[in-house]
Amino acid sequence: MTKILVIEDERTHRINLHKVLSVEGFETIIAENGNMGVDLALQEQPDLIICDILMPELDGYKVLKALQQNPITASIPFIFITAKSDPSDMRLGMNLGADDYLTKPFKRSEIVEAIATRLQKQVLIKKQHTQERMQAEAIMSYLLRYDRITNLPNRFLLAERFQELLTQNEATPEPIPILSLGVERLKQLHNTLGPARCNALLQSIAERIKNLLGKDDTIAQIGPDRFIILLTQSYQKSEVSQIAEILIDAFASPFPIEIHDIFLSPRIGIAFFGRDGRDLDTLIQHASAAMEDAQQTGKLRYQFYLASIGDKSKAALLLEQELRQGIERGEFQLYYQPKVNMPTGQIDGAEALIRWFHPKRGFVSPGDFIPLAEKTGLIVPLGEWVLRSACTQARVWQDAGFSPLRVAVNLSGHQFNENEVDLNGLVVDILKETGLNSSYLELELTESILMENPQAAIATLHKLKSLGIRISIDDFGTGYSSLSYLSQFPFDVLKIDRSFICQLPEDDKNRAITIAILQMAHRLNLKIVAEGVETKSQLMFLEEHQCDEIQGYWFSPPLSAKDFSDLLHSGKSLPLVSASC
């Protein structure tokens, strides 16, 4: 029954209104004054309120204000009744939020019609609010279960569907396969392409994968570069292998994003419910561990989970924790490998190389911790420390009276592909802080870093070059080796990778490649450094073909800062091979 609250101080009007409303079938509550009316409105929460304006203590206007300020009563339809017929009074009441205004004396039909109109309007408002609430709930439910960029299910919905599948298969348990698909370089591309293009790339990846799966299969996105696939139809290992191959082959063609053609390399790890775990979190963990193991080997396109992989994952997690602690505790040192000027035989620079001396593990190979630092993002603080320490040491040698040496520091993909303003600012700050002239700093980058986004890389390199820094391309010949881009990059130095040098001069193919690189670099006015020089015959070959600098064990291994200082004190130089022959 519809409940109506009447607030009226005059007894006769109260009785008349009560009779009228009762005859019309309304439940009527009576308040003799404004204060009582506010209290009853809060207690009873009526469907409509009829209130006199002229009342002692708390008049109708104050009653309405009090009710409007309380969220419990603010939306209740409110009708004023009064003997005052001045239009300004009516306007005041309506401005305060009243729904209607009746002047005394009024006919029974007028009050009944006013009530009916207000209640009908309230029904429509409630209906609209209900629809809006349902829409909001639907949106919230969607946002709770789907990724907003790719519109793929997220981990929450994946868990729901996994549980549904377990319930369906409860009578006849099947080895449900879970696939973890990781896409290499996707995190780095976010920095080079920018958020909008990377979102478009993610959408293209999601669409391509989704089109290859069955209608009952689920592909969920659980990270910026990680997708989890729940298969419902294929249970045999051979069938799952075929699906993994199909998914990987789908990445063979590029993803066109505006003017870019993006090539991506996926890796897949596979775990089975029952064999590799009985809950979703464990299965995702094991499938992802198998995927990461496939990534690290670089040979397997997909891999099934094995217990030994889990052991390696635990070891990697422990190493990551120790790596974080090592950075905080200062367990790292820089070693310096001399770079020798071939025409003069004198040391004219050094490459800074990071070394980790763990208190329990002892020496940890860079091959073990550098990839982990790249993967976890710890390479950024680690790289900043290397840059600052190398510049500081170069200035120390200068202050000690040695001829100024140019120190070379390797930049990681994370460092270079972060916001270029941050990188430029970091370099400027460190040079200012250490007092090192920019001409004595050399930054080394690999081809693969530069070719992720060549146009952006060219712009960043030009800004770095404008600071007076020397730019070197490292490990040349092992990456893309795009000659068209090489002529556009503002390089000063080209370093020939040790994989070519180690087989000189015996291997005819390497001889031809190395000679071609040397000749090309000279035509482009680039200085050439050969790394990994270990034999006299290699040195003779490089001198014969006018290599500018060498570094390698033939002259010296990487040395601690103290040992490098002792080497400088000794005045050791590289005997010219041609002069000694």
Image (spheres, rainbow, N blue to C red):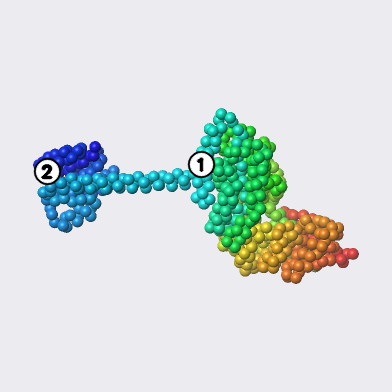
Nearer to me, 310 or 328: 310
Q: Earlier in the sequence, mark 1 or mark 2?
A: 2
Nearer to me, 247 or 159: 247
Quadrant for the N terminus in the image: top left
Residue 384 to residue 140: above or below = below
Q: Which residue ends up furthest to the top in the rendered image?
A: 171
Amino acid found under the numbered disc labelled 1: Leu
Occupied quadrant, residue 440 = bottom right
Question: Label 2 belongs to which residue?
Answer: 13
Q: Which residue ends up furthest to the right in the rendered image?
A: 581
Task: Tell me the residue at 19%/48% (across/down).
Answer: 114
Give percent across and percent down for residue 81: 16, 48
Q: Which mark is residue 157?
A: 1
Occupied quadrant, residue 491 = bottom right
Amino acid found under the numbered disc labelled 2: His
State left or right for residue 156 relative to residue 523.
Answer: left
Occupied quadrant, residue 389 = bottom right
Give percent across and percent down for residue 524: 73, 70
Q: Is residue 133 visible?
A: yes
Give percent across and percent down for residue 264: 64, 53
Nearer to me, 415 or 499: 499
Q: Marks 1 and 2, how far apart in space?
A: 61 Å
